[in-house]
Image (tube, helix red, strand yellow):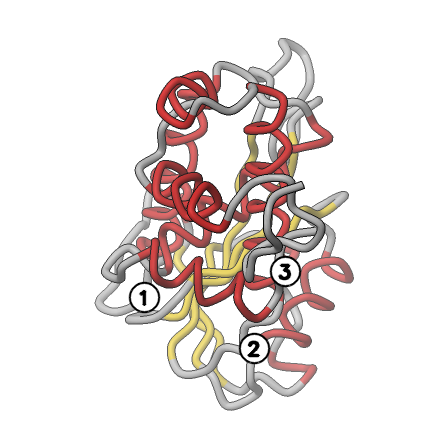
Amino acid sequence: MTKKNRYANRARISTWQVRQLVRYFVLDLTASQMALLTGLNRNTINRYVRALRERIAEFCEAQSPFGGEVEVDESYFGARRIKGKRGRGAYGKTIVFGIFQRNGQVYTELVPDCRKPTLQAIIRGKVALDSVIYSDGWRGYNGLVDVGYGKHLRVDHGKDEFVRGRVHVNGIEGFWGFAKTRLLRFRGIHKGTFYLHLKECEFRFNHRGQNLYHLLLKVLRKHPLN
């Protein structure tokens, strides 16, 4: 049994090895590359990487409500559109709703549908009432003014309108592009772990200007891996 370390409870690897794993994780190395560099078993690497993603997801979920200028949008991840299936999104895809605070951070949440009650519930829980909300023309965003959001401005993508002065959702769409490009490297993600990968994308995007290695170690000192 190795000496107990400050980053992982009941760990069978050393503090130094945990720090190594975090460093290689931040560098976006594969599990095979991490195993080669650390000398650890591939299953051990996978277990700790999953635990890291779980801590990252908890960290993201705990972030403060958004305010100021806020963009809202939804996106679809996964299978290609199936011919003959019509409507918002595509049959078989995973639906993700996103909130982006301009000059700030993004928040994502998996949703079962894009109906108004679903989207409004998340917005009301995460966005301050005095915010300026920008969205596209999807009917799921109807009625935000009625529930207390006095400033809701929209662009109509259906009419090829994407930018009207400050009215656009380019910020959240930039995150969608970042997340989808990054997730392509995995060549398919199991639905059971998609949430954790999504939250990792959110974390990397929100803190892209920071030292992720030091930030993750700080998170683990407060909430060690199990």
Mark found first going from the N terminus, 3 or 2: 3
In the image, residue 209 lies at what x, y percent?
Answer: 23, 60
Please name whichever residue, 33 or 195, is drawn nearer the observer in this view of the structure. 33
- In the rendered view, tell whether residue 158 sits above or below residue 220: above
In front: label 3 or label 2: 3
- In the rendered view, tell whether residue 129 sits above or below residue 155: below
| Residue at (72, 59) in percent of width and height | 116
- Mark 1, secondary structure of its residue: loop
- In the rendered view, tell whether residue 133 sits above or below residue 72: below
Are there few (<14), some (14-19), or many (20+) residues within 10 Å of tag 1? Answer: some
In front: label 3 or label 1: 3
Please name whichever residue, 56 or 188, is drawn nearer the observer in this view of the structure. 56
- Mark 2, secondary structure of its residue: loop
| Residue at (73, 31) in percent of width and height | 192
Report which residue position mark 1 lands on: 167
Report which residue position mark 2 lands on: 127
Residue 24 as seen in the image, left or right of residue 124:
left
Are there few (<14), some (14-19), or many (20+) residues within 10 Å of tag 3? Answer: few
Report which residue position mark 3 lands on: 58
Question: What amino acid does circle 2 point to?
Answer: Val
Residue 112 as seen in the image, left or right of residue 172:
right
Are there few (<14), some (14-19), or many (20+) residues within 10 Å of tag 2? Answer: many
Question: What amino acid does circle 3 point to?
Answer: Glu
Residue 48 as seen in the image, left or right of residue 121:
left
In front: label 1 or label 2: 2
Q: How many dots with numbers?
A: 3
Question: What amino acid does circle 1 point to?
Answer: Val
| Residue at (57, 45) in percent of width and height | 53
Q: How far apart are marks 3 and 2 (CA)?
A: 19 Å
Please name whichever residue, 18 or 2, is drawn nearer the observer in this view of the structure. 2
- Mark 3, secondary structure of its residue: helix
